[in-house]
Amino acid sequence: MHVVIVGGGQAAQQTIASLRQGGFDGRLTLVGDEPVLPYQRPPLSKAYMLGELPAERLPLRPEPWYTERRVDLLLGRRVTAIDRSARRVQLDDGGALAYDRLVLATGARPRPLPVPVAAPDAVFDLRSLADVEGIRAGLQAGRRLVIVGGGYIGLEAAAVAHSLGLDVTVLERAERLLARVASPTLSEFYRQQHSRRGVAIRTGAQLTAVEAGGDGGLVTPVLASGERLAADLVLTGIGILPNAEMAAEAGLDVAEGIVVDRDARTSDPLIFAAGDCTRRPLVHHGGHGRLESVHNAVEQGKLAAAAILDQPRPAEDCPWFWSDQYDLKLQIAGLAAGSDHTVVRGEPEAGRFALFYFAGDRLRAVEAVNSAPEFLAAKKLIPAGARLDATAVADTSVKMRDLAAAALAAA
């Protein structure tokens, strides 16, 4: 059997690892459009951008790892089309690869700015290693950086740039930071944390253009209000788009991502998909959704490998995410959508607290800032469908591990 994996990220690497660990002895080929080995992406907007993590530590595995597992690496190459009837993929150099099973781990790409950009050399995305290499030279103390987008990527980049001595402004179109992904309490906490360090946070700010102008590469972001900002460079962080077009052209089901079942199988039983490009069942929360996280990529890589090998489905965890900004570690377990009330455990003013989201007495999600016990407990409680007493959760004199143990015993 020949398994072809399209993509060069965490999901692709995990699929390879799980296939070999599961006893697969057939041929494996990885086709990645970047000219480098699969690497970690979370550090790009954190330690790597800050210069604390060297480039040689970014790869998920060194090249000998792939050699030992007999993986054919086609790096810097792109699959342009899928021929399902012939069971082969077309490559950008005119060649083709036949497959018995195909895994699409094509990831996602930055959502482009929907405004005229007259100075593209001064506007940067933050998704790939090449993106970060492009912007790092401009991250010099005293320069002015405007970040478009007040989500996690934008705020992580703001924290790094501030630490490097840049004058940072964050523009967010919504009326609060993290509006799509976090509660008002968490949004306000991060607004205060950035503001007190000197980062200018502008909510309700709609960008209409990025104009060229001034000396030394100066650019001018223009707002809908007519205000014109002075900047040396602009960084965009307004979300990502799943790379699902090729799947759609091949006739696979696509709906805001490649639609897969619990085994990461697409509408074609010989084709699987994993990672940011997919829309998957949310088994602990109901419905379907697209998850953008390392956890999702790793889990779906394991699920796809098990299905290819006709082995039992691995356990499915609740979704989890994290963000590092300054000395603040945010860890999120579960999905808050569908909750009807929130309980605060700890003191946001002290920089150590957790927000518990409930639907009735069932826990849906936890957002924990510098509060690892609450995060770790939530990862167990949510899949178990555990019930918690809100009054007990708010009482920090009761240890989280004791609360969790009692809830799990009763579940």
Image (cartoon, helix red, strand yellow):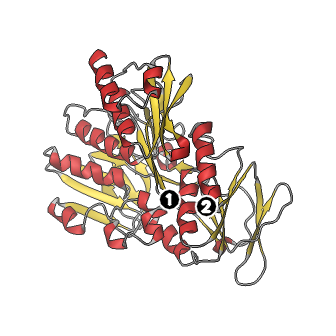
Residue sitting farthest toward the front: 397
The disc, 2 or 1, on the residue closer to the chain's N-terminal end is 2
Q: Nearer the viewer, residue 200 or 4?
A: 200
Left or right, 177 with reference to 209: left
Residue that appears at 75% across and 48% down: 204
Residue that appears at 59% across and 45% down: 189
Residue that appears at 77% across and 62% down: 209
Give the image location of residue 152, x and y in percent.
54, 51
The label number, if any, that marks residue 241 in the structure image: none
Residue linked to disc 2:
197
Describe the element under mark 1 as helix, strand or loop. loop
Tell me the amino acid under the disc marked 2.
Arg
Residue that appears at 71% across and 73% down: 119
Give the image location of residue 258, x and y in percent.
46, 40
**Residue 13, relative to residue 396: is it above or below?**
below
Residue linked to disc 1:
326
> Mark 2 and 1 residues: CB-CB less than 8 Å, in contact?
yes
Q: Taking the image as drawn, is residue 344 in sight?
A: yes
Left or right, 169 with reference to 159: right
Tell me the amino acid under the disc marked 1.
Tyr
